[in-house]
Image (spheres, rainbow, N blue to C red):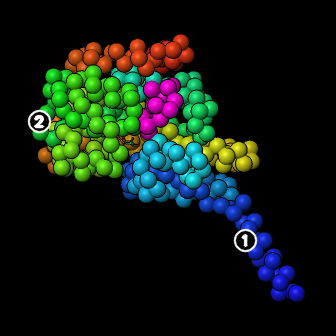
Amino acid sequence: MVRVLLAFAAAAAVAVAPATAQEWRGWNTHGAGYPNTVALDRWAELAAERSQGRIRIRMFHSAQLGQQDEAIQQLRLGAIDVANFNLTPLNNLVPETQVFALPFVFRDVGHLHRVLDGPAGAIVAREIEAKLGMVVLAWFDSGARSVYTRNRPVRTPEDMRGLKIRVQTSDLFIDLMRALGANPVPLPFGELYTALQTGVVDGAENNWPSYEAQRHFEHARFYSTTEHSNVPEIVVVNRMRWDRLSPQDREILRTTAREAAELQRRLWAERERASREKVIAAGVVVTEIEDRTPFARLMEPLYAKYAATPALRALLEQIRNTQ
Ligand code: GTR
């Protein structure tokens, strides 16, 4: 009898344990040493420390839990608890995220950070929360995205004509490439290296750190500083998880996510420079686009299409009026 009771008590203890110290699963597409990876690991550490082990996040990096589009669904369902997503794969799901992806919408990095940390950032976060069942805790910088190609450099929009350019799953980016006369090819990030290697695509577009860290430069040796979009990234938690946290733990999670974002942004600025230097040393041919007006002019119709409603136009105004 005693044995049975003891066994029962042990089983109950096991059953109860996850509610207090369950390990959360975190998703990240990037590998070791990448600014986002370092910052997310730091976030997990800080959250565990300050909650005295009540919040335990295990980060799975390098897209171990799947590619970004799948991970978004997994996070909505609660199979993944926290993640760092780029806004682009959310474009078709939450129209407000498209406004942050519009070409040349941010004046510079300072402007981008002030927008993210101000009322416009709060509006986009609120819409993501309302539509997707995830709570936005912080914003990461993702730099400027530029075009890179395999066979010849892009100097003008005419050079883009007919090129197969990989894009993320986003109608806005598909239209952006079409506006330049290119053929957009939606592909998961993890398949792009091979697609560049085998010539399935002629090029892609990304920031310096991803171009370097994913080793795309090995097969697409021409990088042209079009800097057409500064679409940023979010740190999110599944809504059900969030709702079950005490107010105190919510505060801990939010504050530590913001601290991680500060770290990410600092590391980002350094990594942009370092990645650029590294690929140049490896023989990449950089074409500096001095005058982006011809690109911007062709992309202009995206504004009418993707900031079409009064609410989206107001959001755009909010960005423009941010000093
Ligand atoms: C990177 C971004 C990733 C992913 C990737 C892509 O810059 O950090 O989250 O969006 O681009 O192009 O798929």
Query: Going 72% across and 71% down the picture, which residue do you hit?
Result: 14
Image position, residue 32 (x, y; %) = 38, 57
Image position, residue 187 (x, y; %) = 33, 42
Label 2 amino acid?
A: Arg
Query: Going 19% across and 39% down the picture, which residue do you hit?
Result: 202
Q: Is residue 276 visible?
A: yes
Image position, residue 262 (x, y; %) = 50, 41
Quarter-of-image position of residue 145 = top left
Q: On the picture, is 59 further left or further right than 228? A: right
Q: Which one is nearer the viewer's eye here, 76 or 313?
A: 76
Query: Do labels 1 and 2 touch, CB within 8 Å?
Result: no
Label 1 amino acid?
A: Val
Please say if 161 is above or below 69.
above
Disc 2 secondary structure class: loop
Please say if 314 is above or below 170.
above
In 3D space, how far apart are the residues under numbered discs 1 and 2 (Cα atoms)? 61 Å
Name the residue beneath numbered marker 1.
Answer: 14
Q: On the picture, is 20 further left or further right than 24? A: right
Name the residue beneath numbered marker 2.
Answer: 152
Q: Is residue 37 visible?
A: no
Please say if 143 is above or below 102.
below
Point out the tag, 1 or 2, that comes first from the N-terminus: 1
